[in-house]
Amino acid sequence: MVDNHLRGRLEDSMHETKNGLPERTRKKVADLPSERLSDAIDFGSQAKYAHWNVKGPNVMALHELFFKFAG
């Protein structure tokens, strides 16, 4: 198991590359896809929850709409 001090150092360090981007920019570029994936998973979970828990007079239309997103 990795202790918290070492974990922070591992997460903050980047491998040397041959491109001209500064390390700070490379870190931002590397983090962006993970953040968007997290957003997409969260959205899918919320759509799935809404799909199964929708109530009201337009339940079928809303159920089908949420199903398209949660699919």
Image (cartoon, rainbow, N blue to C red):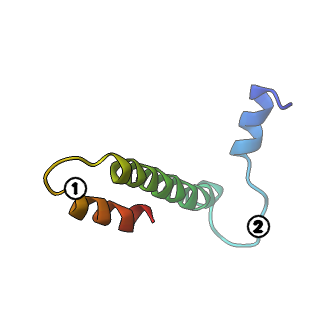
The residue located at (16%, 57%) in the rendering is: 58
User: Of label 2 and label 1, which has the lower sequence position?
Assistant: 2
In-image side of 28 versus 47 (left or right): right
Q: Given the image, on which type of amino acid does mark 1 rest?
A: Val
Residue 38 % position (x, y): 52, 52
Is 46 in front, or is 35?
A: 46
The residue located at (30%, 65%) in the rendering is: 64
The residue located at (44%, 56%) in the rendering is: 44
Q: Which mark is residue 43?
A: none
In-image side of 69 versus 6 (left or right): left
Question: Alpha-carbon neighbours of circle 2 within 10 Å: few (<14), some, or many (≥20)?
Answer: few
Q: Which residue is mark 2?
A: 17
Task: Tell me the quadrant of the picture where the C terminus can be found.
Answer: bottom left
In-image side of 55 versus 53 (left or right): left
Q: Given the image, on which type of amino acid does mark 2 rest?
A: Thr
- Badge 2 element: loop
Q: Which residue is mark 1?
A: 59
Residue 14 % position (x, y): 73, 54
Q: Quadrant of residue 15?
A: bottom right
Residue 40 % position (x, y): 47, 58
In-image side of 2 versus 44 (left or right): right
Residue 8 % position (x, y): 71, 35
Question: Alpha-carbon neighbours of circle 1 within 10 Å: few (<14), some, or many (≥20)?
Answer: few
Is 1 in front, or is 49?
A: 49
Q: Are marks 2 and 1 in contact (CB under 8 Å)?
A: no
Residue extending farthest left: 57
